Image: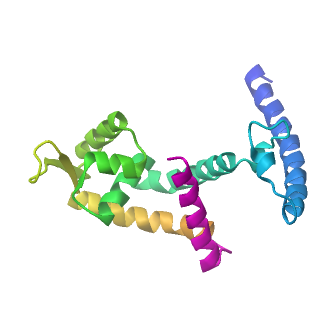
Amino acid sequence: MSRNRLARFDDIEYYAENLHVQVICLCDFWRLGLSQDLRPLADPGSENFHVELYPFYLLNRAVSRYNVQIEAVLRPIGVDIPSWRVLMILAQKEPQAITQVGRSAVINLSTMMRIVERMQKNDLIVARTSPEDGRVTELLLTETGREKVALSRKATAPTYRRLIEGFSAEDFSRLLDLLNRLYDNLD
């Protein structure tokens, strides 16, 4: 067996053991959570820090898994995740300034410029100078872009439905509220 394959096997074995320990720990934490404040255990400055209680670890883990699944359904229709974000933002409201689309898509400006170039080459969007302010570049969907939006919505909807399965309307509203509060606290 090659060294590379052996290293991967060892990693898998380690992570499987570690996952088992984490699952057991999480069960204990959730039981404790009914009566104990878990925030100190999620503080990276604490000697009692537990990564599996750290909100940003959990958020990153969820987003990573989501991106893998979304990428798998978008790839067959010729859309990557950054382009999908731009398409969905413009489908909600257009035209929009390139800087606003970048902020909404959580993409820095230099990366956004490369994405715009690629999307223009693929005839998904057009860029134009704003009629109100000549310093602003606005983005609009093309007919091909609108078609990709429709295909993307159809492709990603099952993942979204699976994602929110078991969440009540109140759970979902609370989740959105908590995520927005976390975001606002970082300001």
What colouring method underlies this structural image?
Answer: rainbow
In depth, the one of 40 and 15 nearer the eye is 40
Q: Which sits in the foreground, 55 or 82?
A: 55
User: Going 29% across and 40% down the picture, which residue do you hit?
Assistant: 118
Q: Give x and y (percent) for residue 127.
A: 18, 47
Viewer-proximal residue among 137 and 158: 137
**Quadrant location of residue 3?**
top right
Q: Residue furthest bottom?
A: 169
Residue 135 percent coordinates (x, y) = 14, 42
Which residue lies most toward the top here?
A: 3
Q: Position of residue 138 (x, y in %)?
A: 20, 50
Residue 45 located left or right of residue 138: right
Residue drawn at (79%, 47%) of the image: 40
The residue range painted magenta reads 164-187
Which secondary structure is most common in the magenta stretch?
Answer: helix
With 5 as the anchor, is 23 left or right in this view?
A: right
Judge left or right: residue 137 versus residue 122. Answer: left
Check if residue 100 falls in the magenta segment.
no
Percent position of residue 146, x then y: 28, 63
The correct choice, above or below, for 16 with respect to 5 in the image is: below
Figure check: 4 above or below 145: above
How many numbered marks have been drawn onto this rendered protein structure? 0
**The quarter of the displayed image where residue 35 is located:** bottom right
User: In this rendering, is residue 70 above or below 92?
Assistant: above
Q: Is residue 159 left or right of residue 35?
A: left
Which picture quadrant has residue 167? Answer: bottom right
| Residue 35 makes an appearance in the image | yes
Q: Is residue 171 magenta?
A: yes
For the N terminus, the quadrant is top right
Residue 72 shows in this picture? no
